[in-house]
Structure formats: structure tokens, C-alpha cells
Image: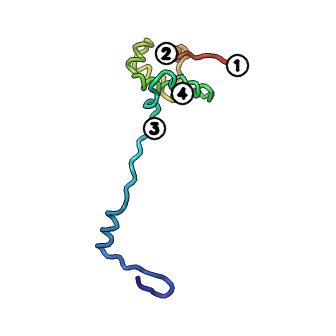
Amino acid sequence: MKKTGKTLTKKVTKKALKKHRRTIVRRPELIPFDAARYLTDGAAIAEYLDAMLEANDLDLLITALGDVTRAWGVAKVAKASGLGRESLYKALTPGANPRFDTILKVTRALGVRIAARVA
């Protein structure tokens, strides 16, 4: 290091710069979170949907039903509910406004019941 006045300067050589570049630690790439990967059994699905119902947000409930449907397999749920795969995708897209009977068909196909409780 060389002192020039009140500041310290360091002469950087090409060799030192190459060595520094090799020691840089790369950040691991993160994968996006997908709730469907963790919905493996009926209890987890029921708890997940119950939490979404408590939020009182229709878009959140539709997203949750979409997650559960993807966890079970869209083709399997479409066949069990009597809906087409394409219409199921459209109905479970955030921002969609599905009819209540569509939601009931999907929940029945998933083996889940929507229950009313006193608030």
C-alpha cells in the first residue's frame, strides 16, 4: 500500500483481479414457492383451505383451490368434478369469478367439504 497524503491507495494488478474474481461466491438460485408441492395429504389440504377461507378474500380462496387442484392433478380433478380441464383452469385463475356451484364441484372432487361456523 502506498500512502499519498491522508488517503491510502492500493495498486491492483491484473493477476490480483483474476484471483479475486475466482473467490467470489455465487448466490444460489432460488426457485419460486409453490404451495402445491407441500399439499400431500387430506389434513394439510383441509388446513390450507380453512386458512384461506378465514382470510375472507375470494381471490385467495380461488388461488388456494388452484394450488390444491395442481397438487392432485388437474386432469384427475376435472374428471371427478365433471368440468373440462380448460374451464377448470379458467375458473381457478386469480381474478376469475367462478360460480358457486363450480367451487362446490371442485371441493367435492378434492374430497373437501366447506362448512359454516358461528363467527
Check disc 4 and report the residue beneath it: 48
- Nearer to me, 87 or 45: 45
Q: Secondary structure at mark 2?
A: loop
Check disc 3 and report the residue beneath it: 33
Identity of the amino acid at label 1? Val
The earlier-in-sequence mark between 4 and 2 is 4
Q: Secondary structure at mark 1?
A: loop
Check disc 2 and report the residue beneath it: 111
Identity of the amino acid at label 2? Gly
Instruction: Identify the colour scheme used.
Output: rainbow
Q: Secondary structure at mark 3?
A: loop
Identity of the amino acid at label 4? Tyr
Could you tell me how far apart the alpha carbons at marks 4 and 2 are, in whole angstroms? 14 Å
x, y percent for residue 107: 51, 17
Q: Give the image quarter of residue 48.
A: top right
The earlier-in-sequence mark between 1 and 4 is 4
Q: Residues within 10 Å of mark 3 (few under 14, many from 20)?
A: few
x, y percent for residue 61: 55, 26
The earlier-in-sequence mark between 1 and 3 is 3
Q: Residues within 10 Å of mark 4 (few under 14, many from 20)?
A: some
The image shows residue 83, relative to residue 65, as above or below, that is above
Could you tell me how far apart the alpha carbons at marks 3 and 2 are, in whole angstroms? 25 Å
- Point 58% across, 28% down: residue: 51
Q: Secondary structure at mark 4?
A: helix
Check disc 1 and report the residue beneath it: 118
Could you tell me how far apart the alpha carbons at marks 1 and 4 are, in whole angstroms? 20 Å
Could you tell me how far apart the alpha carbons at marks 3 and 4 are, in whole angstroms? 15 Å
Could you tell me how far apart the alpha carbons at marks 1 and 2 are, in whole angstroms? 23 Å
Q: Is residue 69 left or right of residue 24?
A: right
